[in-house]
Amino acid sequence: MTDQPAPHRLPGRLGQPGMALRDDPRADPRMLAAMAPYGLADPQPPPPVDKHSSLKALLAFCDEAETAYEAVNDAFTKDLPPVPGVSTDTQTIQGVDGNDIALHIARPADAAGPVPGILHLHGGGMVLMSATGPVYERWRAELAATGLVVAGVEFRNAGGQLGPHPFPAGLNDCASGLYWMADHAAELGISGVVVSGESGGGNLTLATVLKAKRDGRVADVAGAYAQCPFISNAYADGDPTLPSLVENDGYALSCALMASLSRLYDPAGDHARDPLAWPLHATEDELAGLPPHVIAVNELDPLRDEGLAYFRKLLRAGVSAASRTINGTSHAQDMVMRAAMPEVYLGTVRDIKTFADWGCSAA
């Protein structure tokens, strides 16, 4: 009797509905080892809120979640040595809504001549986190050390310590940061501006570029580099065209959690298909004429397929675009695990640097 081949099985939770990230054979073992002390590779309990919860309950949950996320991020970065050759300062600008906005700027200490600029927009589902968080301070410094001027926008969130300010408050702050950088390029010593961010910051990256086109300022953007963008708003009801929402659901990030965050971003649901709130709903006409884009996604992320869908839509609209999939990683881990996976982390840093050099020289 000969051995029979194992039957083909769909990946992740498409093939095994109860699979945990720690048991997925695609997962990078270095990532799993780093996650293990915090239980992040284990099945996650459902959040205590959902899209039907009261805004008060959602905001209270966000306060707790923000504290927990920042603690984990601090743990991942606390033993790293400082990044050499980088200086930092903070610039306060006025936003289009008349509010003050802090831009946290990292630059190479010995830069000679104009260098590419990065407008960095942090993650957190447009609801949580801060540009002063340890992961983002590190990220700006690592990018600056390659020869970039990086400005992190402290935009208003829909929840947490910087909330509650639902859409379009945060987007308006990000656009204000873009326009200020473009208007002060000579002062900053930059040759152009690439907008970049991950997760909710990936949403805001794409939305800021769309808003710049609507505002007649798309020429201010040399390019967009969106990492694992949170852009479909399909988290409560699903979407059969986005199988990663099932395949990787619960791999350190769940659709139930994302649906709760999306409710805070747009409490009345008035912007459920507004591309400035959820860029995947942009038409090809709205995308036409945009600057070059890179869409980077994580193989084991529930958001993977919406990022790839946006990339394909950009191509159909005639936009210069590339995509990149970081295999073995769950949501945004290529910009978090500097110690555990330096090759993966620095691969993304190098890719952003190469794209910014090219985009700003062509702008």
Image (cartoon, helix red, strand yellow):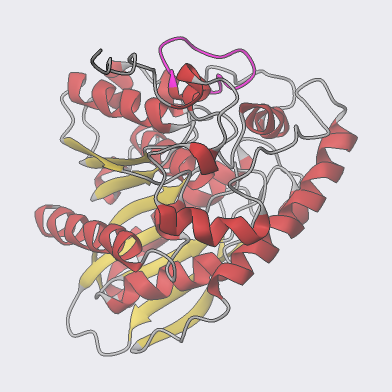
| Residue nearest the viewer, comparing 191 with 197 | 197
Would residue 327 appear left or right of 165 to someone viewing this image? left
**Image height check: is 17 above or below 34?**
above
Residue 118, relative to residue 9: is it above or below?
Answer: below
Q: Residue furthest front?
A: 1
Q: Residue at x 41, y 86 (%)?
A: 87
Q: Which residue does the image show at 50% across and 12% down from the upper left? A: 239
Q: Is residue 166 left or right of residue 178?
A: right
Which residue lies most toward the left here?
362
Where's residue 254, x and y in %?
62, 32
47 up-or-down from 93: above or below: above
Task: Name the quadrant containing residue 280.
Answer: top left
327 and 12: which is toward the camera: 12
Left or right of 127? Residue 315 is left
Which quadrant of the view contains residue 120? bottom left
Q: Nearer the viewer, residue 58 or 345?
A: 345
Would residue 103 be seen by someone viewing this image from the given angle?
Answer: no
Q: Number of callouts in the render? A: 0
- How far across and how far down the image is residue 330, in percent? 46, 44
- Percent of width and height locating residue 163: 75, 49
**Looking at the rendering, in which quadrant would you find the N terminus?**
top left
Position of 132 relative to 62 (above/below): below
The answer to whether residue 343 is seen in the rendering is yes
Please name the predominant secondary structure of the magenta segment in the image. Answer: loop
Residues shaded magenta: 232-243
